[in-house]
Image: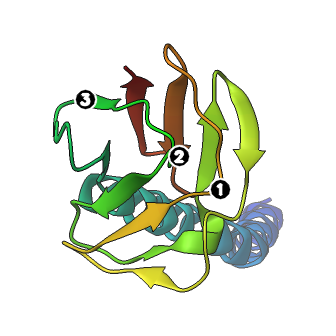
Amino acid sequence: MGFGISIATAILAIGLILIATVNYERVSDSCELLQGARDVQHGRMLSVLDTGIEIYNTSACSYEDRGEVADSASDIFYIKNTGTVSIDKSELIVLVNGRIVNQAAGSGWLYPGKEFPTTTFTLDSGDVVKVVTANARSACAEVV
């Protein structure tokens, strides 16, 4: 009877070792995938914090959350990068009164502290212009 108990204990021990060996790889892979997802999320959150844009024109410079754009014949307003990372102009989305009017606001890069004019829109008094970056940062201005 002692020999049978020893064999059963050995079989159980070998089974537990095999189960642990097989499942270790799965658990390890899951932990690596989870850490990779957290790194991506952290990078995205850092990108959002480092991105900032403003809309203004020369007659009404307002660097608040909701600025003003003067209603003029030229309909020129400027988009300024107030953040610390460069923004791809082709990824900017411009909305007027909630409708996308131009998904490619230009080509090239908008470097921190730099600005560029947009002139391809017809704006009327009361219109609301909103510019959204690729990582969902936005700036809004009302045409006055």
Residue assigned mark 2: 132
Mark 2 residue type? Val
Q: Residues within 10 Å of mark 1 (few under 14, many from 20)?
A: few
Spatial separation of the CA atoms under disc 2 and disc 3? 13 Å
Report x, y in % for residue 61.
16, 42
Most foreground residue, 141 or 135: 141
Q: Residue at x 57, y 24 (%)?
A: 124
Mark 1 residue type? Thr
Mark 3 residue type? Asp
Q: Earlier in the sequence, mark 2 or mark 1?
A: 1
Q: Earlier in the sequence, mark 2 or mark 3?
A: 3
Identify the colour scheme used. rainbow
Q: Earlier in the sequence, mark 3 or mark 1?
A: 3
Q: Residue at x 81, y 70 (%)?
A: 11
Residue assigned mark 1: 120
User: Residue placed farthest to the front in the image?
Assistant: 73
Q: Secondary structure at mark 2?
A: strand
Most foreground residue, 107 or 7: 107
Above or below 126: residue 114 = below
Spatial separation of the CA atoms under disc 2 and disc 1? 17 Å
